[in-house]
Amino acid sequence: MSFLSLGLTEAQPAIVGAGFWIRFLARALDTIYGFLFGYIAGFTGGVALAILQAHALVTPGWHQRLVASPASRIVLSLLGAILYHTFCEGLSGASLGKLMCGLRVLSDDLTPCRLRPALIRSLAYYVDGLVFGVVAYLSMDKTPMRQRHGDHWAHTVVVKNSQAPETSKPSDLRLLAALAAGSSAWVLSIFVGVVWAGY
């Protein structure tokens, strides 16, 4: 007796977590994207400081102050990266790098990821990323769904987009809105860091 005669369909293949190297590539692509933000925000911040100096709102020497105090720029750039991943993954399940690599972040029950879990996994990346990602690699190697520590703490998984349930896939408009929100947050954070350091 066949499955069709019983009214059954063949079983769907089991969903598996995305591997370390494809996720590494997605993060690398996001980092390159972030460098673009750095150039845009750095240039715009420099122009803003020059305008402020021309109106006597910033004292001369902001170039030297900018170089001498990188802490605020670094902290706000990291904050921007966290916000970028949080908005992109929490609103649409994917950053630009993950979209390019065909990946999707989901809750571990395969429903769409939300902002809070996305924030937890984004913060945890700075633990998982230690020693060039060895911490994440070792964690992922121990679980069937290849979850890094951030995924465990946030109750999320990263899967191939082709395996994600249709109900968990956002519309194109939502994808664009999430990418715009995340990208804007990253650019604004870097811009504020540049202006603050030079002020």
Image (cartoon, rainbow, N blue to C red):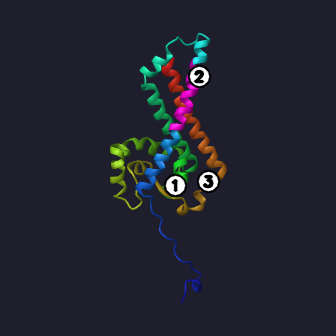
Q: Mark 3 points at which residue?
A: 170
Q: Residue drawn at (61%, 17%), measured in percent from left and top?
A: 51
- Mark 1–mark 2 distance (CA, rounded to whole Å): 35 Å
Where does the magenta region start and end?
A: 35-49
Name the mark on residue 47: 2
> In the rendered structure, which disc, 1 or 3, sits on the residue that comes first in sequence?
1
- In terms of sequence position, does the residue under pointer 1 or pointer 2 come before the other? 2
Amino acid carrying label 2: it is: Val
At x 44%, y 48%, the residue is 154
Secondary element at tag 2 = helix
Residues at circles 1 and 3 in contact by the CB criterion of under 8 Å: no
Please give the label number shown on residue 101. 1
Single out the mark in the foreground, 1 or 2. Answer: 2
Residue 20 has which mark? none
Label 1 close to label 2 by CB (< 8 Å): no
Nearer mark to the viewer, of 3 and 2:
2
What residue appears at the point 34 percent right and 43 percent down from the top-left corner? 130
Question: From the viewer's perspective, is 25 left or right of 58?
Answer: left
Residue 4 lies in quadrant = bottom right
Which of the 4 quarters of the picture holds residue 6? bottom right
Helix, strand or loop at mark 3: loop
CA–CA distance in space, label 1 to label 3: 17 Å
Residue 41 is covered by the magenta coloring: yes
